Amino acid sequence: MTLQSLDIKRRSATTTPSPQARQTPEIAKLIDVSACTGCKACQSACMEWNDLRPEIGHNAGRLDNPADLSDAAWTVVRFTETERNGRLEWLIRKSGCMHCSDPGCLKSCPSPGAIVQYKNGIVDFQQENCIGCGYCVTGCPFNVPRVSPRDDKAYKCTLCSDRVAVNLAPACAKACPTGAIRFGAKEDMKAHAETRVAELKERGYSQAGLYDPPGVGGTHVMYVLHHADQPESYGGLPANPSISPLVELWKGVAKPLATLALAGVALGSLFHYVTKGPNEVSKEIEDEIEREDREAVK
Amino acid sequence: MIRDPKDLSRYTASQRANHWVIGICFILLSASGLSFFHPAFFPLTQLFGGPVWARILHPYIGVIIGAALVPMFFRFWKLNILTRTDIEWLMRVREMIDGNDHDMPEQGKYNGGQKLVFWGMSACILALLASGLVMWRGYFTFPVGIVRVAVVVHAAAAIAMLLTAFVHVYAAIWTKGTIRAMWYGTVTRAWAKQHHRAWYRQATGK
């Protein structure tokens, strides 16, 4: 259910404006990977608040548990062991929906209102309108939405839209014991990230930076990375994410062009009939055949 | 309509049934497919008992049309090989559209336009089937990069097929005396002589 206290900026498969009179500031979650200890309190809090219980899986040889996002695991802490300057480096990143300003899932979705983007920036799936086609999976540059094998509905992090609507921080941010997850107005989060990045630079992480990728118009989940030049090393965080040009083509110009072409041919046919008339068998040939028949009888 | 025993047989009952299976599937696939393509068509999902049912049924109907294409294709492909006369006919199709069919080159069972419809439809169904299977999450899981190509191929082939079908249906409505061939398989001799003279000669021995 969409929340009446949150106005809607964009709504999937909808060509007219949604209610948007109320002004809400853009919010963001800032995840400082340099302060994350990988305790997974965020995962537990997410499960608890959203009543999710992912099935017990198998050990995938990593600390990631569960091994991947699922319909019941909306956030997963990913652990990557890398080597830098001959030293082991353990990169830990809480993954989940990035809440893009330009959401590929919403653009791909064919079902009116199954995906909405609130004015505060949260991108939310409305399962009761979801038809289970999986187009959102195709649209997402971050490989986030998961279609449930149980009910064929797509699920992902809601950024606790229900909590945010009543002025509470998302459950994961509330639970984080190290303060690695912060929540607030996007502008404030950016300012906070700046001071963190400066601190990291001082400590020798010369490439430290904020991850707020412009290819998707910025995101409402941002990261402070100590190696912002190599986001991929954090469990495959894409360096320059953007909606695939194929998806843009399919859900962009193709829609109006094809609809116009169909209407054009249909109307063209109608007016062809009206102006040129039907292509009837000529009287001449009919008479010819009748004559032949009469002669054959004689 | 009085049925003349001298009418020419154009299609057998099983050929007609084959065509109808494809036609019905095509209508159902268009209605459900278009509704996922543009929100303007979304209300069409109500014909299937709602959008979720439309999503569930669409691929199964797709499998049926794919299966029905196989006998259709092998029944008619030889009759649809393009000849020099067909090319000439196609070059002068403007006269035909103008309603001036008197000087058009003599046609066999199918004219150049009909042959293009045959090959176009066959190619579209094949492309739709292949890309559709890639998108069918109920049974298949392909890497997202391949699915993204498939959705574009599926949409492009579907629109091409719809446009071809519009032309196909309109041509049948426009050319009087044609639709009955689809219902009960016969056409009048005069119809054949006017539109497919070479086939008329072959069928009547004149």
Image (cartoon, rainbow, N blue to C red):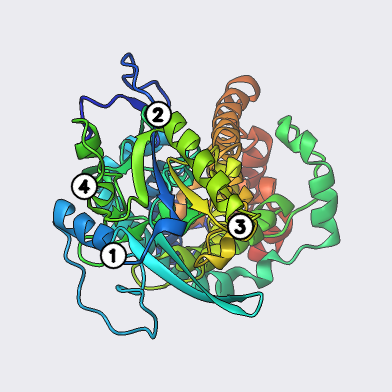
Co-location on one chain, circles 1 and 3 = yes
User: How would you rate the neighbour count of disc 2 (Cα within 10 Å): few for under 14, some for 14-19, many for 20 or more?
Assistant: some
State which tag comes first along the sequence, 3 or 2: 2
Q: B77 or A146, which is in the foreground?
A: A146
Real-space Cα distance between discs 1 and 2?
27 Å
Pair 4/2: label in front: 2
Q: Quadrant of residue B77?
A: bottom right
Q: Circle 3 sits on which residue? A: A205
State which tag comes first along the sequence, 1 or 3: 1
Pair 4/3: label in front: 3
Q: A217 or A245, which is in the foreground?
A: A217
Residue at 23% across, 52% down: A175
Which chain's residue wears label 4?
A: B
User: How would you rate the neighbour count of disc 3 (Cα within 10 Å): few for under 14, some for 14-19, many for 20 or more?
Assistant: some
* Residue A192 seen in render: yes
Which chain's residue wears label 3?
A: A
Residue A245: image x %, image y %?
63, 48
Residue B164: image x %, image y %?
60, 47
User: How would you rate the neighbour count of disc 4 (Cα within 10 Å): few for under 14, some for 14-19, many for 20 or more?
Assistant: few
Q: Circle 2 sits on which residue? A: A26
Real-space Cα distance between discs 4 and 2?
39 Å
* Residue B183 seen in render: no
Residue at 60% across, 69% down: B76
User: How would you rate the neighbour count of disc 1 (Cα within 10 Å): few for under 14, some for 14-19, many for 20 or more?
Assistant: many
- What mark, if any, has residue A40 been given in the picture? 1
